[in-house]
Image (cartoon, grey):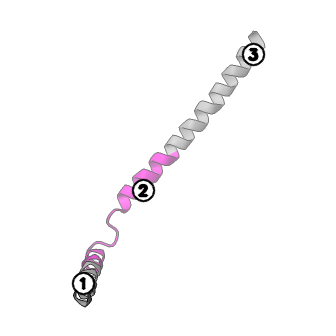
Amino acid sequence: MLHVVATLHTFGLKVADRVRTRLAEAPERGNVTIEHVLWAVAVIAIVGTVVAVITQFVNSEANKIG
């Protein structure tokens, strides 16, 4: 059992070391992707709002006619 614990501990240390090394090399890697996703969400929200307002306006005008 001690062998398994020691192996997992060593594995965890190696993984943590690799993560620290990658973050030190490129700390802002992936920020562009996050920015694109946030812009896409903002655009989708704006378009959804515009569609809802136009739909409500058209329905209210249709009710006035009919």
Q: What element carries label 2?
A: helix
Q: Where is residue 11 in the image (x, y as percent from the top left)?
A: 24, 81
Give the answer, above or below, for where 43 lies relative to 14.
above
For marks 2 and 1, give the CA distance: 42 Å
Which residue lies at the image location 25% right of the left edge and 79% below the top edge? 21
**Pointers 2 and 1 in contact (CB under 8 A)?**
no
Residue 43 higher or lower than 57, as above or below? below
Residue at left offset 63%, top offset 26%: 55
Q: Is residue 30 magenta?
A: yes
Q: Give the range drawn in magenta.
A: 18-42
The N terminus sits in image quarter: bottom left
Q: Name the residue under label 2.
A: 35
Element at badge 3? helix
Q: Residue 14's x, y, as percent?
A: 23, 82
Q: Mark 1 points at which residue?
A: 4
Q: Mark 3 points at which residue?
A: 63
**Main SS of residues in magenta:** helix
For marks 2 and 1, the one nearer the N-term is: 1
Residue at x 33% of width, y 73% of height: 27
Q: Which amino acid does label 2 sit on?
A: Glu
Q: Which amino acid does label 1 sit on?
A: Val
